[in-house]
Amino acid sequence: MFMITTAAVAMLMTSAQPAQTTPVEPNTEAATLASDSLTQGRTISAIAKLEKQVARAPQDPALLINLGIAHAQQGDAEKAQALFERALVSPEPLDLETADGDLIDSRRLARKAMRMLARGEFTPRLTRRD
């Protein structure tokens, strides 16, 4: 089984590959659309889409990371940190492929997102009306 989800950290786009363990199965179309919304500055739309997906797959690290990024871009660092932490301890880690073709473990990506958040690299964006 091959599944694709996306997580955006800064401008790095990633897609999830099945991990060693049985992966969670998010709705890939919605996750991709949320990633598009994030990169286009439509964080309100991304949050709405991702929250629905996280409700269906609450331990999916790629969805949790995307949702954390959306909240960070909205200026809610506390909520973003909590979501990154959930992704970090997810019992179902995923191997994520970056746009450059590099593979990175979802836990490593979650730690990277937390460091970026601590350094203020997710600046709140002006939200476009969707």
Image (cartoon, grey):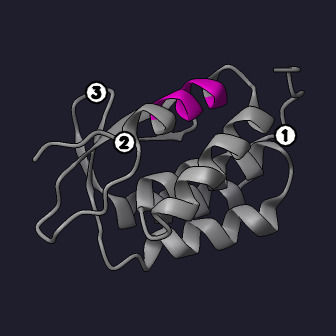
Residue at 55 percent of width and 59 percent of height:
54
Q: Amino acid at mark 2?
A: Thr
In percent of width and height, residue 11 lies at 53, 29
Tag 1 or tag 2, which sits nearer the N-term? 2
Question: Is 62 displayed left or right of 93 in the figure?
Answer: right
Q: Earlier in the sequence, mark 2 or mark 3?
A: 2
The boundaries of the magenta stretch are 32-38
Q: Is residue 83 above or below residue 116?
A: below
* Residue at the image point whose x is 62% and y is 67% from the top: 83
The numbered mark at residue 71 is none
Quarter occupied by residue 73: top right
Under circle 2, the secondary element is loop
Q: Amino acid at mark 1?
A: Pro
Q: Looking at the magenta stretch, what is its main secondary structure?
A: helix
- Crowd around label 1: few <14 · some 14–19 · many ≥20 (10 Å): some
Whether residue 121 is visible? no
**Residue at position x 56%, y 47% from top?**
66
Q: Which residue is mark 3?
A: 100
| Residue 71 shows up from this direction | yes
Which numbered disc, 2 or 3, marks the residue closer to the eye?
2
The residue that mark 1 highlights is 124
Residue drawn where x is 64% and y is 26% of the image: 37
Which residue is disc 2 drawn over? 5
Q: Secondary structure at mark 1?
A: loop
- Mark 3, Cα crowd under 10 Å, few <14 / some 14-19 / many 20+, is few
Q: CA distance from mark 1 to mark 3?
A: 26 Å
Tell whether 117 sits left or right of 63.
Answer: right
Give yes or no for residue 40 being in the magenta stretch.
no
**15, above or below 116, in the image:** above
Kindly state the secondary structure of the residue where label 3 is placed. loop
Q: Is residue 120 left or right of residue 13?
A: right
Q: Amino acid at mark 3?
A: Asp
